[in-house]
Image (tube, helix red, strand yellow):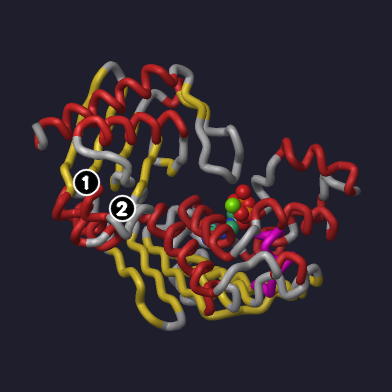
Amino acid sequence: PRLANQIAAGEVVERPASVIKELLENSLDAGATRLEVDVDSGGIKRIRIRDNGKGIDKEDLALALARHATSKIHALEDLESVATLGFRGEALASISSVARLQLTSSRDESGKGWQVSAEGREMQAQLAPAAHPRGTTVDVRDLFFNTPARRKFLRTEKTEFNRIDDTVKRLALSRFDVSISLRHNGKGVHNLRAGSGRVEMERRVAQLCGPAFMQNALHIEVERSGLRLWGWVAEPAFSRSQADLQFFYVNGRAIRDKVVSHAVRRAFADVLYHGRHPAFVLYLELDPASVDVNVHPTKHEVRFRDSRLVHDFLFGSLHRALADVRP
Ligand code: ADP
Ligand code: MG
């Protein structure tokens, strides 16, 4: 189990931001409507995520950290199968193998819950009672304290925090129905209220992408032959220093894709732009059967069944929308 955990950890737990991504996904899976993310020193020292989801039963707490107790992987020779299987169902075990982790949870409104801790590979399987509202708190300290080789790959605290911020933004722009806060070294960075109306969504986009983006943004909404594109695009001119203001979601999932970026870039270049990065927050919705999202479990990749159709739809929709405001 130890070996398996550490191999798995290499896949899922690359850096603080990837820990946060896994933990937030767990919280959302648990039906949380409020997520609080607290990090210290770029997340390297400490990551604490608290949610108001359904919580974890006392009996399941230790199990949640010990998935690999029933390990599938027994030796390094099995690395090949590691690559193909991916690591669903093993995030907590992986994280706890390379950090000091404390998991506290409660299933009800009694204010009472249970806590379990693990430090590196040595799990203190001891359950202790703990005060906690309904929901779960995962506290991860000293990431890679026992794997110096991995720790060496971490960048500066500032860089690691920027990746965390990006991860939180990416998620916040896909779940307007969930309230999210982010704090770094005790200082509030984002405090986003839940709300899925147009006004509330635009407020959140402005908070995350800056007021300049929202002021310049064009709202678009196009639907044709089973494809729907909506969101906001802005002239890139204002975003000279914000080359990373590019968010694209396929059926609610953040992705990076060549077909998509090519279509978007061409539409912008054609109508009003030469060279610089366009800024956008866009959502493409289509029949789940016409897109394969399981290309890689941890990467943001998709494969469209008919990539030509998607490309032309994106290009056409954006081209028309942009040309309307900039004839
Ligand atoms: P996976 O999410 O793929 O099942 P994880 O290792 O990420 O695997 O989590 C293990 C299990 O722990 C989950 O299946 C879930 O039952 C439980 N769990 C983890 N985080 C939470 C949470 N925030 N709220 C409720 N249950 C959780
Ligand atoms: Mg998970």
Q: Which residues are magenta?
A: 92-101
- Which is more toward the observer, 66 or 78? 78
Residue 171 lies, in percent from the top left, at 41, 53
Position of 286 relative to 139 (above/below): above
Q: CA distance from mark 1 to mark 2?
A: 24 Å
Q: Report the residue at 70% width, 62% height from top.
A: 65
Residue 125 seen in the figure: no
Residue 158 lies, in percent from the top left, at 49, 73
Which residue, given by chain and number where applicable, does mark 2 sit on? 177
Q: Report the residue at 77% width, 67% height from top.
A: 149
Which disc, if any, is residue 234?
1
- In the current view of this chain or complex, which residue is farthest to the front? 274
- Which is more toward the observer, 248 or 70? 248
- Earlier in the chain: of badge 1 and badge 2, it is 2
The question of residue 95 being in magenta is answered with yes
Q: Report the residue at 77% width, 73% height from top.
A: 146
